[in-house]
Image (cartoon, grey):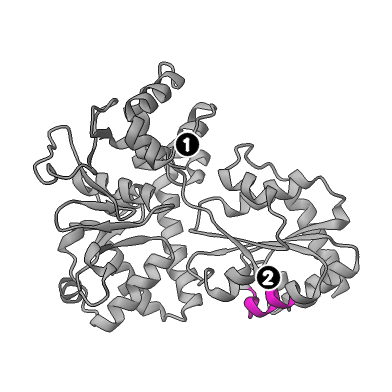
Amino acid sequence: MSSLLEIAVNLSANKITQQIPDYKRFLFYDIKKSDSKIIGIYGARGVGKTTLMLQLLKDLNLPLRETIYISCDHPVFSGVSLFDFLEEFSKKGGKIAFVDEVHKAPEFQAHLKSTYDFLDIKVIFSGSSAVQMTNPDFTRRFSMYRLPALSLREFIELELNISLKNYLLEEIIKNHQDVALEIIRELNKEKILKLFGDYLEYGVYPFYLEDKKKFKDRLSDSINATLYTDLAEIYNIHPEKIVTLKKLLTTIAVSEPLELSVENIASVTGISKATLYKYIDYLSRAELIMYIQNEAKRFKSIRKPDKLYLANTNLLNALCLNAKKGTMRETFFASMLRYRHSLYYSNKVDFLINEKYLFEVGGKNKDFSQVKNNKNSYLAIDDIEMGFERKIPLWLFGFLY
């Protein structure tokens, strides 16, 4: 184990010296303030988990012998006991270990638990969102943080190298004109609707910065890696079944959200209902899709179909050549709201937020005909910079985090 530790220290030193982005996601500051002994970061492929860990490591400014970065998908760690390695690191004076791709380590849950119980070191680990990282055993012992995809606000900060505030949902609802005006002033001569359009096309994943022209190819590779590597390994899915899983993903991409009853999908894809429910769960855990329940499902005795969307607009653009504007708008709205808010769809309106606010999502000509008698009803309207009364610009919901 000593020789492995020596190799790992050298690998860690090489990784730390690599150039990483200066821009720090909001979770950087939350995790930096945490006193928890073991911290977990989970999220979809490509959202920046490794970058976040390296930024946290560099910020510590500790001697090399006291910190280490390892990635459990590196061949040198194949079959290695994570606990034994961390124990050896601790014996040699190690204080804090950053463990990337922890789900690649055999029985990692038990090893992290033993580390928590028996070792005097701090661990910050990352794992795929496809793994059940929020089960009670994890959340009881460890501080778990979900790193979402970039918000519109973060994308604009990266593009323009400026700092912008985020806003609570209630602030946006009550003061959206003032909030929108403040943001537009901060942008100076940059046009918010142009930036919004760019975000919808390629701004969700930080790796777009590496090469915008090859973004779709990189995203396609990321989708395939999620399907053929992450899901296949985590859930022991045969390669032939992964092809069916990809067919399901494409079917969701080209369909209207409410056209997708289980019966319809089963007919189109040839997947049994039982398997279909399982596959939808896998794709949702991997953050390739999101399913929005009907508000009636708050009452368990009532059965209603779920609304299925791709997880974000970049996936929609990558998998659907001619995505409908309505689906694009709803996908953006749902992807921004679901991070910190409860989200249902209703038979009356597109979305019910926090079991209180009713929202219709649409273009400039959308009116209140479906929700006119409800004081908590609002329109999220595309293609406008500024709103009026209960008409709120759609882009503004990209400033929730």
Image point (20%, 51%), residue name: 350
Under mark 2, the amino acid is Pro
| Image coords of residue 16 (percent x, y) | 75, 49
Question: In the rendered image of this protein, does residue 58 appear above or below residue 144?
Answer: above
Q: Quadrant of residue 371?
A: top left
Residue 196 is left or right of residue 165, and the answer is left
| Image coords of residue 141 (percent x, y) | 65, 70
Count of labels shown?
2
Q: Nearer the viewer, residue 33 or 71?
A: 33
| Image coords of residue 106 (percent x, y) | 64, 79
Q: For the magenta stretch, what is the residue range?
A: 105-114
Question: In the rendered image of this protein, does residue 119 appear above or below residue 312?
Answer: below
Q: Mark 1 = which residue?
A: 166
Residue 245 colored magenta?
A: no
Residue 112 colored magenta?
A: yes
Tell which tag, 1 or 2, sits nearer the viewer: 1
